[in-house]
Amino acid sequence: MRRIISILLENEAGALSRVVGLFAQRNYNIETLTVAPTEDTSLSRLTLTTSASDVEVEQITKQLNKLIEVVKLADLTDGDHVERELMLLKVKASGAQRAEVKRVADIFRGQIVDVTASTYAIQLSGTTEKLDAFIGALSESAILEVVRTGVTGLSRGEKVLAL
Amino acid sequence: MCLVNKLSNSEAQESEEMLSGGEMLVRALQAEGVEYIFGYPGGAVLHIYDALFKQNTIKHFLVRHEQAATHMADGYARATGRTGVVLVTSGPGATNAITGIATAYMDSIPMVVISGQVQSHLIGTDSFQETDMVGISRPIVKHSYLVKQASDIPKTIKKAFYLAGSGRPGPVVVDIPKDITNPADLHPYVYPEAAVIRSYNPAQRGHSGQIKKAVSLLLGAERPMIYSGGGVIQGEGSTLLTSLVRVLGYPVTSTLMGLGAFPATDKQFLGMLGMHGTLEANNAMHHCDVLLAVGARFDDRVTNTIAKFCPYATIIHIDVDPTSISKNVAVDVPIVGPVDSVLTEMLSLVNAEAKAGAQQNDKPLSDWWARIEGWRGENCLSYESDSTIIKPQQAVEAVYQVTNGDAFVTSDVGQHQMFAALYYPFDKPRQWINSGGLGTMGFGLPSAMGVKVAFPDSEVICITGEGSIQMNIQELSTCSQYQLPVKIINLNNRSLGMVKQWQDMQYEGRHSHSYMDSLPDFKRLAEAYGHVGIEISGPDALFEGLKEAFSYKDRLVFVDIEVDPSEHVYPMHVAPNGSMRDMWLKKGVRT
């Protein structure tokens, strides 16, 4: 099952390598990973997704918690949560295709953020499924480049991951 | 002339002291009460070595290879419970220390390893003797630091010692670039009183509800079993465990790492469990209905096939490290906490219940003991002696007799390690010192040296084989330099015995590269280093030879014993797909 694990990490050199190294060392997989400093500059917020059984996830979260630089951790998929991923695509946009691409982007609430005579750059955010669906809706030959941030997210309601 | 000494008096501490990074490091180590450093100098740590030279409270032992420094510190730590300290230079000094750090990590041994690093401005430029020590050691340390500025040295050392010794102990690496220790740059020195690490809060006590639940399960058990691991020794829980086992009257077994936590000569002790465990211990594990695991981690060398492990048992597991719980085997009553605190609570509950007459399992318990005695009666550790060649088991038993079972015993890895574990019963914690987790050949001699440093008046023996001893034999030189009169018992079968045993059992006797050709004359080799060498061949010479060896009180004696090369270690788990009770008992004979 896909899990979203959100981590408050000491914003120190080498901290990220310990998280990533743990996954490699213990044969867990990371599907997506996103990390940036928070409003508290001593902390980074790291979000990763992994596919694992409940037993494996329990071990993964315990092993992560054992890392000295992991301050706090939550499995967002344990409860209701909001998740988003940002994607930028560069697509061919010439001739009749140009209008079609624009129309599909509109349907998905994507924004065109750069334009040339033959290409569009499109920005789209949403759940992983939505981004996958958008890629599916475009013809494969139209896509020149795709870049995705990986999933980030928050718990719904009052629950917060903070010190 | 001598800044460190001049400032070590307490008056000087009132004003702000100005020290170099190297001096701060030495002062910090002194503040931690460090008595010994095991190390090897080199370019990146010259400033630190100079600061060491100018003081006399910390004694430094110069090894012949950095791996041995880590094992010496490790042996010291295992024997004393204190944190072992290692100092190595950058590059090859650091990489040579890696095996010893991994050894300590796998067995949860408190250790602080200080490694020199190239100057800050050279990091990342592939400069001379540069290696990314923090990166290389990352998977085998509890934590590590790369010190960025001299003023960070005191608090980093404070944190390193706190981390190494608390919770589940382990090695901590502190990598220090050379420029940080420059004697020309002085900085104010203040040693922090406490380490503040907001994200690190090891459990201080177990959950009372869980402990109650565990006690009621234990008291209601019909076929109880207690499985004790290295954590009981590390967590200073030996006395408590012994009391608990005796109050309950239950059988107890131990992992390789836990030997000595409960006296091995006690009737309630069923011997070691696991791959080379006794018939009675492994059978009792397999058939028990309530299992109490204390400071053990359900290692694959214990469980055999996980799916067949303890099929009838409700499992209680006490461990200070939450990741140990339900990692390999799902447990029913997890208790996260230090073994001493949890066992104290358990013991008082058990005592209270016993007074109230709550323990009603007398009949099933005596039936259980009768079954166990049946297994014990099969005498699984018996072996056939021979009139012409010494059996390795016999050699270990003779060492036990000659030392009254009272010596510190270290070992290397292989058949001799198992023979030592099975045939030298350990009655005291910290008496048996071996690399259980990583299985590091070359561990025995330097760890024995570390023990001898801590306990110069105690008998310290390294039981080894001619394969393992040659992995760190250069340390015979260190022993000469510092007069470390350990006794080396070399069970010489002229082959890599455990490899050969597996090749006999699983590869139809094809002994691919498991023989030792061109062995040195160990007696003369020992003599060349200034020690005493004794050769023993034939059972008739065994006892007298050992007596002579142990009569040299202040000399290192290398005892080279010719043992039967065809001998196997039994019992041995049947693998793959065997349960704990599936064992080979003799060549070709299984349960």
Image (cartoon, coloured by chain):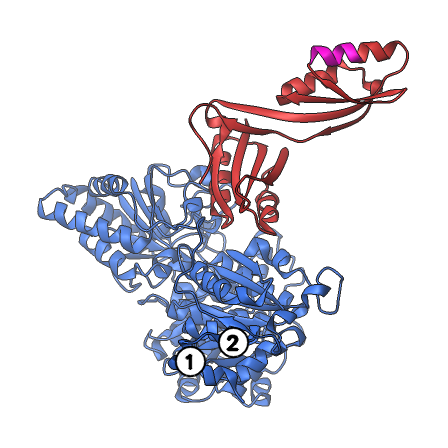
Chain colours: A red, B blue
* Quadrant hosting residue B31: bottom left
In the displayed structure, does residue A91 sit left or right of residue B160?
right
Residue B452: say if magenta: no
In the picture shown, does residue B385 fall above or below B220? below
> As rendered, which of B92 and B78 lies closer to the eye?
B92
Residue B353: x percent and y percent?
Answer: 13, 45
Q: Residue at x 64, y 19 (%)?
A: A129
Q: Give the percent coordinates (x, y) of residue B331.
A: 37, 39
Magenta-tinted stretch: A102-108
The type of residue carrying mark 1 is Ala
Q: Work out which quarter of the rendered image holds the N terminus of chain A and state it.
A: top right
Mark positioned earlier in the residue sequence (1 or 2): 1
Q: Which mark is residue B18?
A: 2
Residue B540 in view in this figure:
yes
- Residue drawn at (71%, 64%), measured in percent from left and top? B121
Q: Count residues near mark 1 (Cα–Cα under 10 Å), then give few for <14, some for 14-19, many for 20+.
A: few
* Nearest the eye: B385 or B391: B391
Chain letter of the residue carrying label 1: B
* Residue A97 rendering spot, x and y as whole percentages: 86, 12
